[in-house]
Image: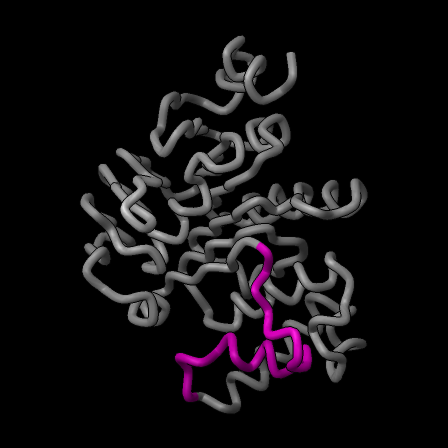
Amino acid sequence: MLALDHLRVSYDGVRALTDVSLTVGAGQIVALVGGNGNGKSTTLRAAAGLNPLDGGSITFDGRPVHGLPAHERVPLGLSLVPEGRRLFPKLTVRRNLELGAFTRSDKAGIEADVERMFDLFPILRERATQLAGTMSGGEQQMLAIARGLMARPKLLMLDEPSWGIAPKFVTKVLLLDEPSMGLSPIMVDKIFEVVNDIHGQGVTVLLVEQNASRALQLANRGYVMESGEVTMTGEGHVLLNDPKVRAAYLGE
């Protein structure tokens, strides 16, 4: 579904991704783990077209997309919910949702999808006229996911997502970037429950997560990133029990 081949990305001349290759196969949960500053979010941003490449290629749903700008990838079905949610804090919940459908022109369909998002995330209906920036972190996560789903993507990349996607809105591939960051333990549990539920509905998931233990418990396959490179890969349960991974990321 998604293939990143030998990606190289720099910020102001400083290399952030040195050589990143990974694939997300249909029907899998794939976890990308590693410490802060090792290039996990940069990898998702590159896939979305937000970071220009110094080299490498990106194939999405069988089509090369690395030459396309971000706004041309969205209509193809590639959508990112970024780290930190990046909502429009001074706009209402409803307006944030509507802006998630900026590539669409079907007004009736957009309104129907807003209502469906309210059904999926009832708290958003209660907060429909509230400014997004005044909501709690967990509520903002829900809004960020719902906004991403408004584009009806084939692949949704989520950075710090939250919970609750019904079957009629599931994507072919779901990319999650640090879903548990900054949330309460109860909300973290809900997040991972929902990721597992989404996968059970037939959705492919790419999960970027600092909580390596939780991510690898779910993953069919995992990739470990260090200093802008993929240094290890294997089945999730194998990486979870690897002494190097446990020492580096699980505190053992």
Q: Is residue 20 magenta?
A: no
Which stretch is magenta?
84-105
Query: Which picture quadrant has residue 30?
Result: top left
Q: How many marks are shown on the rendered structure?
A: 0
Most common SS among magenta residues: loop
For the C terminus, the image quarter is top right
Q: What sort of colour scheme is used for the picture?
A: one colour
Q: Tell me which residue sits at (44%, 27%) in the image.
A: 224
* Magenta stretch contains residue 88: yes
Is 226 placed above or below 120 here? above
| For residue 108, above or below residue 18 | below
> Closer to the camera, 96 or 170?
96
In the image, is residue 105 above or below residue 178? below
Classify residue 195 as left or right of residue 174: right
240 displayed left or right of 75: right
Q: At 74% from the left edge and 41% from the top edge, which residue is drawn?
A: 189
Could you say which quadrant of the image residue 144 lies in?
Answer: bottom right
| Residue sitting at the far bottom | 107
At x 19%, y 55%, the residue is 64
Where residue 28 appears, x then y in whole percent? 44, 38
* Residue at position x 48%, y 51% in the image: 174
Residue 75 point in image, percent of width and height: 34, 71
Q: Is residue 29 left or right of residue 183?
A: left
Q: Position of residue 49 (x, y in %)?
A: 32, 59
Image: 84 above or below 106: above
